[in-house]
Image (spheres, coloured by chain):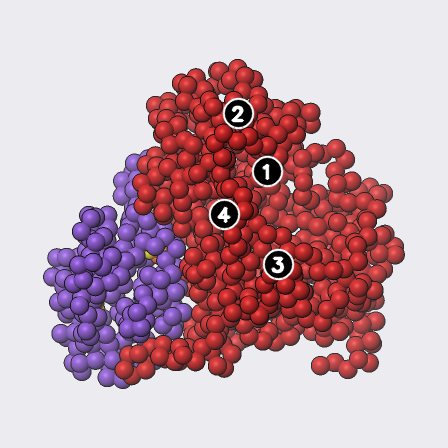
């Protein structure tokens, strides 16, 4: 540890150096420091396995009696399944299992959650705070004490506050650390808080459903898949996206004989379990949806009573969809009219126990709110919203906030940056915050400092040029992460967070079929110098004179206080991990009673006045999108069940299951190109962007010949990620054409086309 | 007692949770596995089907791996579970050659390892780790000689197959199709 006197001295040094770096922030690889990298190769094959080897009498696990079980909830994806970390006497986490009482997982974690041990054991984890310094004219990181790093950030943040106002700070966040830093920045005086999960992911879906039903499908989704009789998936690949509850319930639906209809240019796993696979021409989904609506209305299949009781705008809708016959849609979607009619009939037969699933990652073509609207309208016509086997009404419990002074009111927020754009953005689009961090002409940028917590913007954000310009213009860039993701290479200060298995976080208070409370607590002591996000936020707060907002010594005090307000306690939760509460309201519409939807008029908006007033189509329109030129194929990306984007890309246990992605191509395409099975190729897009690395070809009948498919989250170019480096391709480097959704600022990413390079293009990779 | 497993290919999504749960439960070194998932694709676009299967040792009734073992390390326990006693195994690998399913691997510590049906869990009344974790609940484990067991029932009511029956090993992992 540094002495305080050293700290002050080096702090001044690095402060000056930081100040000079305004012109160019070089990308620094953390391996330059020789941090922890060496340890892995030989030991890697046995990583994470503190479990003693099997006894001679084949009684493995007999030492299980010596284990402790510590409650946690998973942080590998947003589903946050509750589980138990199993800890040995010597403080090793050997496995993580689900908590039987958690309705989100029913005692069963998904492969990523089961593999969460790998996150804890990853030898490449960040270990100590790092500060950017200039050494011999070159920028590099220097290991620093927490005291030094925190004081440096706090003094920079104070500067920014006095020079430009607190609103000049912004937060990018994902997952649990986000709440701690949100609290810090709200106390500091800014509301510029953005998460890629909005504009890059579920934003269009949520805005589309809110415009129709007055509320979104939430997270975890209120889809009643368990009891459905017909599940319609449009590009949503449940089973490859392992959102645990949905995967479990889809399996139950299969057992119950539900009809599954999957619309996907690729035979996804879900498509393979479906009665109908509709291999649609990509980008034409709205045409299909409009023709389904046409069939329901003109073949008299819709739920008249539901529509007349709860919805408005039916006449306009009916007149509008008159011309959208299945024959019209056939020419656009390549789906036969009979197939369109039959599937519409299947939905009507099952109604109201039918789900047109709105998916989750919905930022595709820039008209995504409208596509989500079309799905919402279809659900309304079938009467599924508020009915068993459709969408239920969630019920949750809100924990009171731990007492703190009121947040100051910022002079401006991200909403003031919109300038009339994206009128229905109800969360800050990341791209807006990024653009506002770039100076234009003689105009100073509005945003001057970022904290990036738990999100690798380099993989998450498709607007590479803007992102890089913004990062070069910032006066302060702090990255908090557990891993040396690419984004850490751009930071002025890197703060190593401990993993979810080593920390307290907020109580998971879930709204779903029933309200649940769920505890995450440290299973073992945090490794190396890593610290929990709550501690980092509090330390920064105190240094910024905001101590009153952090009136506790340990976060467990906050949790205990909150839990006691709702009749539980930290002690109780430590024992049980999950507490189910009973619900008070009905999860479904009650026959014969009225229901007020949370829209302006209280009715479901088939025709949206809100959209009309904002200058958008009140009824969803089909727009023709560009198609690939000869020799190019539409780039479709998605999920694999063993990975959560780049978050798990270096997890040794999960890398062992799936070390790289592959590019799926149809055999006919392979034949044209003379490409062989398992051959490695480079990908180049319509704008000349070339993939950093080569990717293995998977030749498969499971995909159309006008499209290729890759799993998102691979192709990392940061060498300190030893397991992930150079494996596969990163789809976002090939997404240079972004189709903005004018309604809420979503970044549509499916308008990119790639071709194959069979020879090494010799691209230089910044690593 | 005859332990067996039935796995519903109509529900399996190929997520490999069974693989990683086995790995953490049984301390299988990274890079090796006692169970694994296969995908078979049939047909041509757009008439394509796939079958996903979670595979492991079949705990064969007629087990060539046990017969060929020179030390008796490979043996059959109660309930038909085929096991390797580690400290008797000399790592000669004869059983690896004899198994038609490639169910065994050479553990870096010098013995041969494979699926044990999680006998340490089963003896305590738990399900094997893979069965307990599977998010789709597509795996059934139990006693085929118990007429009331779940597995007996599911095999009574569903069409099923076993792998490579022609090898004559009488495998005890059944795939519901
Ligand atoms: S679905 Fe999987 S990754 Fe997500 S929280 Fe649950 S166990 Fe973790
Ligand atoms: S865990 Fe279950 S669903 Fe997943 S691959 Fe294994 S058997 Fe299939
Ligand atoms: S599957 Fe192979 S290892 Fe298992 S019992 Fe049969 S022959 Fe032996």
Q: Earlier in the sequence, mark 3 or mark 1?
A: 1
Given the image, what chain letter belongs to the residue carrying mark 2? A
Q: Residues within 10 Å of mark 1 (few under 14, many from 20)?
A: some
Whether residue A476 is situated above or below residue A202 in the rendered picture: below
Q: Would you place residue A675 above or below residue B113 in this image?
A: above
Q: Is residue A417 left or right of residue B172?
A: right
| Residue identified by numbered label 3 | A566
The quadrant where ligand 2 appears is bottom left
Query: What is the quadrant of residue A94 in the picture?
Result: bottom left
Choose the circle earlier in sequence order: 4 or 3: 4
Q: Which mark is residue A109?
A: none
The mark that comes first in sequence, 1 or 2, is 1
Note whether ligand 1 is within 8 Å of mark 3.
no
A474 is higher (above) or lower (below) than B145: above
Measured as percent of width and height from the top left, residue A31 is found at 61, 69
Residue drawn at x 31%, y 45% as measured from the top left: A255
Q: Give the distance between the C-alpha atoms of the residues marked 4 and 2, in whole angstroms.
A: 25 Å
Name the residue that disc number 2 marks: A309
- Mark closest to the chain's N terminus, 3 or 2: 2
Q: CA distance from mark 3 to mark 1?
A: 26 Å
Q: Residue at x 13, y 67 (%)?
A: B62
Q: Colour of chain A?
A: red
* Disc assigned to residue A513: 4
Q: Residues within 10 Å of mark 2 (few under 14, many from 20)?
A: few
Which of the 4 quarters of the picture holds residue A496? bottom right
Determine crowd level at label 4: few under 14, some 14-19, many 20+ residues with C-alpha closer than 10 A. Answer: many
Tell me which chain appears purple: B
Q: Nearer the viewer, mark 3 or mark 1?
A: 3
Q: Secondary structure at mark 1?
A: loop
Q: Nearer the viewer, residue A418 or A95?
A: A95
Are the residues flagged by discs 4 and 3 from a single subunit? yes
Kindly identify which residue carries mark 1.
A215
């Amino acid at each position: 540890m540094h002495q305080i006197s050293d700290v002050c001295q080096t702090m001044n040094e690095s402060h000056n150096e930081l100040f000079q770096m305004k012109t160019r922030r070089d990308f620094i690889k953390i391996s330059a420091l020789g941090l922890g990298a060496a340890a892995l190769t030989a030991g890697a094959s046995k990583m994470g396995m503190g479990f003693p080897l099997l006894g001679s009498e084949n009684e493995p696990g007999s030492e299980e009696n010596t284990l402790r079980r510590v409650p946690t909830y998973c942080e590998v994806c947003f589903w946050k399944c509750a589980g138990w970390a199993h800890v040995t006497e010597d403080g090793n986490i050997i496995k993580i299992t689900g908590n039987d009482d958690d309705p989100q997982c029913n005692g069963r974690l998904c492969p990523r959650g089961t593999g969460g041990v790998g996150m804890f054991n990853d030898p490449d984890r960040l270990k100590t705070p790092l500060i950017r310094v200039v050494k011999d004219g070159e920028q590099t990181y220097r290991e620093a004490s927490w005291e030094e790093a925190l004081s440096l950030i706090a003094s920079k943040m104070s500067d920014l506050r006095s020079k430009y106002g607190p609103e000049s700070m912004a937060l990018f966040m994902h997952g649990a650390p986000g709440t701690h830093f949100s609290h810090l920045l709200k106390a500091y005086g800014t509301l510029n808080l953005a998460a890629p999960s909005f504009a890059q992911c579920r934003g269009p879906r949520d805005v589309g459903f809110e415009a129709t039903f007055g509320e979104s499908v939430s997270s975890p989704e209120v889809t009643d898949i368990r009891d459905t009789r017909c599940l319609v998936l449009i590009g949503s690949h449940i089973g490859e996206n392992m959102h645990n509850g949905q995967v479990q319930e889809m399996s139950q639906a299969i057992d119950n004989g539900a009809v599954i209809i999957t619309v996907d240019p690729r035979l996804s796993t879900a498509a393979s379990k479906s009665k109908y696979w509709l291999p649609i021409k990509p980008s034409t989904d709205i045409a299909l949806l409009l023709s389904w609506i046409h069939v329901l209305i003109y073949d008299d299949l819709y739920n008249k009573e539901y529509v007349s009781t709860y919805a408005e705008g039916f006449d306009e809708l009916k007149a509008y969809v008159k011309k959208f016959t299945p024959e019209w849609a056939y020419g656009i979607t390549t789906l036969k009219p009979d197939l369109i009619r039959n599937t519409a009939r299947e939905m009507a037969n099952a109604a109201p126990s039918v789900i047109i699933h709105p998916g989750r990652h919905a930022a595709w073509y820039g008209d995504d709110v409208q596509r989500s609207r079309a799905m919402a309208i279809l659900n309304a016509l079938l009467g599924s919203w508020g009915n068993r086997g459709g969408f239920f009404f969630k019920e949750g419990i809100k924990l009171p906030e731990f007492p703190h002074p009121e947040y100051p009111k910022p002079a401006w927020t991200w909403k003031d940056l919109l300038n009339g754009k994206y009128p229905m953005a109800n969360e800050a689009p990341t791209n807006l915050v990024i653009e506002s961090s770039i100076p234009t002409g003689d105009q100073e940028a509005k945003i001057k400092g970022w904290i990036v917590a738990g999100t690798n913007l380099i993989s998450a954000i498709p607007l590479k040029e803007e992102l890089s310009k913004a990062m070069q213009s910032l006066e302060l860039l702090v990255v908090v992460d557990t891993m040396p993701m690419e984004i850490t290479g751009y930071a002025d200060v890197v703060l190593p967070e401990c993993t979810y298995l080593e920390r307290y976080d907020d109580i998971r208070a879930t709204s779903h079929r029933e309200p649940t409370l769920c505890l995450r607590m440290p299973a073992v002591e945090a490794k190396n110098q890593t610290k929990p996000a709550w501690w980092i936020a509090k330390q920064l707060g105190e240094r910024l004179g905001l101590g009153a907002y952090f009136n506790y010594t340990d976060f467990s005090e906050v949790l205990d206080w909150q839990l006691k307000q709702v009749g539980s306690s930290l002690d109780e939760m430590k024992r049980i991990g999950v507490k189910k509460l009973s619900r008070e309201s009905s999860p479904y519409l009650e026959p014969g009673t009225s229901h007020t939807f949370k829209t302006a008029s209280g009715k479901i908006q088939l025709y949206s006045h809100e959209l009309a007033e904002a200058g958008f189509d009140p009824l969803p329109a089909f727009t023709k999108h560009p198609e690939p030129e000869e020799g190019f194929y539409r780039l479709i990306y998605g999920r694999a069940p063993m990975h959560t984007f780049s978050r798990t890309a270096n997890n040794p246990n999960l890398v062992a299951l799936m070390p790289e992605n592959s590019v799926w191509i149809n055999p006919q395409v392979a034949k044209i190109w003379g490409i062989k099975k398992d051959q490695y190729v480079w990908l180049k897009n319509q704008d000349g962007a070339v993939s950093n690395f080569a990717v293995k070809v998977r030749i498969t009948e499971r995909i159309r010949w006008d499209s290729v498919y890759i799993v998102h989250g691979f192709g990392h170019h940061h060498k300190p990620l030893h397991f992930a480096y150079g494996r596969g391709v990163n789809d976002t480097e090939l997404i240079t054409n972004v189709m903005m959704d004018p309604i809420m600022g979503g970044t549509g990413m499916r308008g990119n086309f790639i071709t194959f390079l069979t020879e090494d293009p010799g691209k230089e990779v910044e690593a | 007692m005859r332990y067996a497993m039935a796995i519903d290919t109509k529900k399996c999504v190929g997520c490999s949770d069974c693989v990683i749960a086995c790995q953490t439960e049984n301390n299988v070194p990274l890079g090796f596995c006692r169970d694994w998932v296969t995908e078979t694709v049939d047909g041509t676009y757009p008439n394509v089907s796939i079958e996903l299967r979670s595979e492991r040792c079949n705990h064969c009734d007629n087990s060539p791996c046990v017969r060929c073992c020179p030390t008796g390390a490979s043996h059959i326990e109660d309930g038909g579970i085929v096991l390797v006693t580690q400290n008797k195994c000399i790592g000669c690998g004869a059983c690896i050659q004899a198994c038609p399913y490639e169910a065994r691997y050479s553990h870096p510590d010098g013995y041969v390892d494979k699926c044990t049906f999680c006998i340490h869990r089963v003896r305590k009344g738990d399900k094997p780790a893979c069965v307990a974790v599977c998010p789709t609940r597509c795996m059934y484990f139990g006693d085929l000689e118990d007429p009331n067991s779940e597995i007996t029932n599911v095999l009574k009511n569903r069409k099923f197959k076993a792998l490579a029956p022609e090898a004559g090993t009488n495998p005890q992992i059944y795939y519901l199709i």
